Image: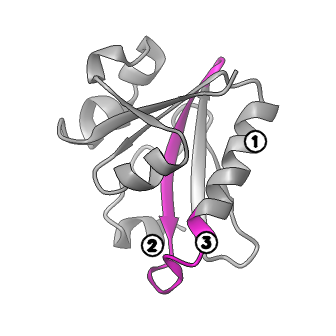
Amino acid sequence: MVASLQAAGLPVSDLHEGDAAYFALSSGDAFGGLATYGDVGLLRSLVVAADKRRCGAGHKLLTELLDIARANGIRDLWLLTTSAEAFFAKHGFEKADRSAAPPAIAETSQFRDLCPATAALMHLPLA
């Protein structure tokens, strides 16, 4: 998983922050993480194998991650992206100003240090 994240240019130095849990499709073609901070979640490091993109693996994994988030009581889900804003917008996420990030998200390494200021902050209310 780490090699896939690095190959996609995604950060790996903070993978365990926020009690993050990582999930893979049974095919091993896609990985994603979910960090939880009470009832707020940060979608982490969604990556699909290059040869499996545009085949539905990302959609399937995101659907599973949303189900897991809801089952774990997450009411607000956030993410940062530099390359997949359109993908997440198709799934209901809305772009938010970085000043709108709740403290739990704004204090993460990903928000503060690892994602550039140009990364889009996106939000999806789950409750």
Residue name at image x 36 percent, y 37 percent: 110
Answer whether labels 2 and 3 touch (C-beta < 8 Å). Answer: no
Q: Quadrant of residue 101?
A: top left
Check disc 2: other Cα within 10 Å, few if <14, some if 14-19, many if 20+: few
- Sort mark 1 into few (<14), some (14-19) or many (20+) by Cα contacts within 10 Å: some
User: Residue 83: percent from the left, percent from the top?
Assistant: 30, 57
Per the model, the C-alpha gap separating discs 2 and 3 is 21 Å
Q: Is residue 82 left or right of residue 26?
A: left
Quadrant the N terminus occupies? bottom right
User: In the image, which residues are magenta?
Assistant: 37-58
According to the image, label 1 marks what residue? 68
Amino acid residing under circle 1: Ile
User: What numbered label is drawn on residue 76?
Assistant: none
SS category of the residue bearing label 3 = loop
Is residue 59 within the magenta segment? no
Q: Residues within 10 Å of mark 3 (few under 14, many from 20)?
A: few
* 52 in relation to 103, above or below: below
| Location of residue 73 with respect to 86 vertically, above or below | above
Q: Is residue 72 above or below residue 116?
A: above
Residue picked out by circle 3? 56
Q: Secondary structure at mark 2?
A: helix
Q: Earlier in the sequence, mark 3 or mark 1?
A: 3
Residue at (61% x, 71% y) in the render: 56
Which residue is disc 2 drawn over?
3
Q: Is residue 5 above or below residue 42?
A: below
Q: Nearer the viewer, residue 20 or 52?
A: 52
Question: Given the image, on which type of amino acid does mark 3 rest?
Answer: Gly
Relative image position of residue 107 (x, y in whole percent)? 38, 20
Mark 2 / mark 1, whichever is N-terminal: 2
